[in-house]
Image: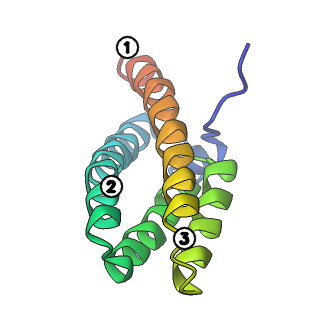
Amino acid sequence: MEKSKTDLRFLTDACAGDKTTIAEMIRGFLVQKNEFTSSVKNLLHKKDYDTLRKTVHKMKSAVKIVGMELTYTYLQELETLIVNATHNLSSISNLISVVLSHLDDSEKELQSELQRLID
């Protein structure tokens, strides 16, 4: 069995176990994940590195809340590549693909958790 991409212990603790609040936070993450997914490829294509960096930076806190430590590390690395003006399109593109894959996997996990919370 594949290791879980998310760990909701922090979120559960921060919400004092309140299922309604946890579900609301998960829904918010999923919205932000979809916005991130739709914008990063476009920003990379346009070579808008400043906005791409800001978008990546903002997503770091979102993945931290749902316990996506490995994805957080990849986002840090991605932000560093962009900040250091090492605009190696191939490296950035590859790392974005890895991050998007992790986010897609997390969506499945979080949708299952949402279902469990509302049942």
Dot 2 or dot 3: first in sequence order is 2
User: Disc 2 and disc 3: Cα gap in Å?
Assistant: 15 Å
Q: Is residue 95 left or right of residue 43?
A: right
Query: Mark 1 packing: few (<14 Cα in 10 Å), some, or many (20+)?
Result: few
Residue that appears at 61% across and 38% down: 6
Residue 26's x, y, as percent?
Answer: 40, 41
Question: In which quadrant will I find the N terminus?
Answer: top right
**Circle 3: element type:** loop
Residue that appears at 51% across and 37% down: 101
Q: Is residue 1 left or right of residue 55?
A: right
For the residues carrying marks 1 and 3, which lies nearer the camera in this image? 3
Residue 114's x, y, as percent?
Answer: 40, 26
Q: Is residue 101 left or right of residue 41?
A: right
Dot 2 or dot 1: first in sequence order is 2
Q: Amino acid at mark 3?
A: Asn
Residue 58's x, y, as percent?
Answer: 42, 70
**Circle 1: element type:** loop
Q: Is residue 16 visible?
A: no
Displayed quadrant of residue 78: bottom right
Q: Which mark is residue 41?
A: 2
Residue that appears at 58% across and 61% down: 91
Q: Amino acid at mark 2?
A: Lys
Q: Label 1 belongs to which residue?
A: 119
Q: Label 3 belongs to which residue?
A: 88
Q: Amino acid at mark 1?
A: Asp
